[in-house]
Amino acid sequence: MAEQRRGTHGTDGTEGGHGADEAGEAAGAAGTAWAPEAYGEAAAAWEALVATARRTVADGLVVGTSGNVSARVGDLVLVTPSGVPYDRLTPADITGVDLAGRQVVGTLVPTSELPLHLAVYRTTDARAVVHTHAVHATAVSTLVTELPPVHYMAGALGGVVRVAPYAAYGTDELARNMLRALDGRSGCLLQNHGTVTHGATLDEAYDRTAQLEWMCRLWLTASSVPGLTPSLLTEAHMAEAGARLKGYGQRR
């Protein structure tokens, strides 16, 4: 969505911060995230990231190069590059930045939504972030300030899903608005924009995105029936569902 150009982001997400240069130089001298011995793990993460990005297109959650995906490996954040169709990405296109936003791996310019991704990693223990422009979720973001609790799967995201107030894409303001909406949650809507979810893995972050889009579609469908209003779950219902969902699935 933005032109291909290089840039660094300060620790507050602003461009050109000296902290980014110093952090990048220090990390480079120490040979951390992008060192040869760590590259194998980063390469595997990049492969999974590209597969997830392609899945967002295949499942209709994004169109073209809209949306973006990232994964954290140590202090390295791998991100989809700006304006490059996902089906053209190869292992050689690996793109990564440090937590200060300085590019340390690859030659392609990182996504224009880099401040959004870095804000999540700086404030949570997330290891993956998925951002989409899913149709139903974006539609809901234009109608309400939070997604009405029509289904207990909202509990998997921490509770009722909030809508972050609108701000221009790629800005620190958008990142700040998103963080407030994500407080205590693993997913939120961005007003007139799309979705953001995070998780311990790419699969978990993606599943949360898909569930969020499904819940938005469910609410839009139910609320469109003339003369009827969808029944909503209570806070107690949501708390119970959230507790039960923590034990859902197979244990390793």
Image (cartoon, grey):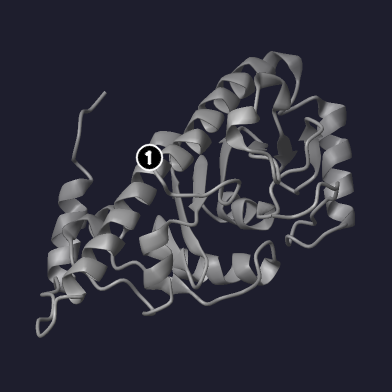
Residue 252 horizontal side relative to residue 244, left or right: right
Residue at left offset 38%, top offset 79%: 143
In which quadrant is the N terminus drawn? bottom right
Relative height, residue 40 to residue 231 (above, below):
above
Q: Is residue 115 visible?
A: yes
Q: Amino acid at mark 1?
A: Glu
Residue 56 horizontal side relative to residue 225, left or right: right
The answer to which of 106 and 194 lies nearer the viewer is 194
Q: Is residue 201 visible?
A: no
Residue 25 horizontal side relative to residue 64, left or right: right
Where residue 231 appears, as percent x and y from the top left, is 10, 75
What residue would you read off at disc 1? 204
Where residue 101 appears, as percent x and y from the top left, is 75, 48
Relative height, residue 36 to residue 96 (above, below):
above
Where residue 138 appears, as percent x and y from the top left, is 43, 66
Where residue 12 appears, as percent x and y from the top left, is 73, 62
The answer to which of 219 and 16 lies nearer the viewer is 219
**Element under label 1?**
helix
In which quadrant is the C terminus drawn? top left
Residue at left offset 73%, top offset 60%: 13
Residue 203 horizontal side relative to residue 219, left or right: right
Residue at left offset 50%, top offset 34%: 54
In terms of image quadrants, where is residue 188?
bottom left
* Residue at the bottom extreme, as displayed: 227
Relative height, residue 166 to residue 158 (above, below):
below
Count of numbered badges drawn on the protein: 1
Q: Residues within 10 Å of mark 1 (few under 14, many from 20)?
A: some
In terms of image quadrants, where is residue 167?
bottom right
Relative height, residue 220 to residue 32 (above, below):
below
In terms of image quadrants, where is residue 144?
bottom left
